[in-house]
């Protein structure tokens, strides 16, 4: 009986190892105060795009730019959305993330270095949650910028 328990425990440890092999832990969040001179600083030229009319069975994508005009790395800590039909994705250097949404949040994504720009892609697929008429959907990005800890990127459309 003891041998069976030890064997089961060893198998369980092996499964946990296989499930987590190759995964890197999220780095520590670098925290800053608004008063800090050296810190990340987010610049967003536009946080709202009207994508015009679309059919309910269409999928539309738009990109927003997120620039770090500060002196320290800007950490993108989470991506999520306002609806199950809307997804956010980060494109930065050689990184293109998965699509994250309301029920699939990202956790830590990447560091955007000072002077660099990342693209925030917003994907809207109204057929997942069919609605008609004027619609507004959001993608939320959490950062370590004390002035902009949560940034909202909004798309507007008219679904027909």
Image (cartoon, rainbow, N blue to C red):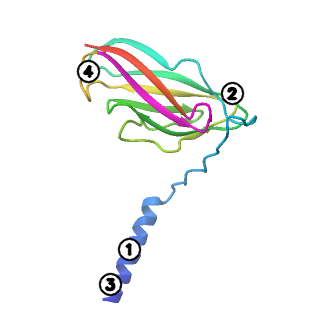
* CB contact under 8 Å: marks 3 and 4: no
Distance CA(mark 2)–CA(mark 3): 59 Å
Q: What quarter of the picture does the N terminus occupy? A: bottom left
Between disc 1 and disc 2, the foreground one is 2
Residue 101 lies, in percent from the top left, at: 39, 36
The residues colored magenta run 134-149
Dot 4 alpha-carbon crowd within 10 angstroms: few under 14, some 14 to 19, many 20 or more = few
- Is tag 3's residue or tag 4's residue first in the polypeptide sequence? 3
| Residue drawn at x 43%, y 71% as measured from the top left | 13
Distance CA(mark 1)–CA(mark 3): 11 Å
List the single residue furthest toward the top: 52
Dot 3 alpha-carbon crowd within 10 angstroms: few under 14, some 14 to 19, many 20 or more = few
Dot 1 alpha-carbon crowd within 10 angstroms: few under 14, some 14 to 19, many 20 or more = few
* CB contact under 8 Å: marks 1 and 2: no
Residue 108 horizontal side relative to residue 88, left or right: right
* CB contact under 8 Å: marks 1 and 3: no
Q: In front here: 55 or 40? A: 40
Q: What quarter of the picture does the C terminus occupy? A: top left
| Residue drawn at x 47%, y 37% as measured from the top left | 79
Q: In front here: 120 or 74? A: 74
* CB contact under 8 Å: marks 4 and 2: no
Q: Main secondary structure of the magenta part?
A: strand
Residue 149 horizontal side relative to residue 20, left or right: right
Residue 126 lies, in percent from the top left, at: 29, 24
- Is tag 4's residue or tag 2's residue first in the polypeptide sequence? 4
| Residue placed under numbered mark 3 in the picture | 4
| Residue placed under numbered mark 1 in the picture | 11
Q: Quadrant of residue 58?
A: top left
Answer above or below: position of 13 versus 66.
below
| Residue placed under numbered mark 4 in the picture | 57
Dot 2 alpha-carbon crowd within 10 angstroms: few under 14, some 14 to 19, many 20 or more = some
């Amino acid at each position: 009986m003891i041998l069976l328990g030890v064997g089961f425990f060893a198998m369980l440890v092996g499964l946990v190892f296989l499930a987590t092999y190759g995964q890197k832990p999220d780095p520590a969040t670098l925290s800053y105060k608004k008063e800090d001179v050296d810190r990340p600083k987010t610049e967003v030229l536009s946080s709202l795009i009207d994508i015009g009319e679309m059919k309910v069975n269409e999928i539309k994508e738009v990109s927003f730019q997120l620039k770090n005009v500060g002196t320290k790395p800007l950490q993108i800590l989470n991506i999520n959305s306002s609806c199950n039909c809307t997804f956010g994705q980060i494109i930065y250097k050689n990184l293109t993330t998965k699509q994250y949404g309301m029920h699939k949040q990202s956790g830590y994504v990447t560091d955007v270095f000072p002077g660099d720009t990342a693209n925030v892609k917003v994907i809207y697929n109204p057929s997942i949650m069919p609605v008609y008429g004027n619609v507004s959907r959001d993608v939320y990005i959490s950062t370590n910028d004390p002035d902009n800890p949560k940034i909202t990127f909004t798309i507007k459309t008219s679904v027909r």
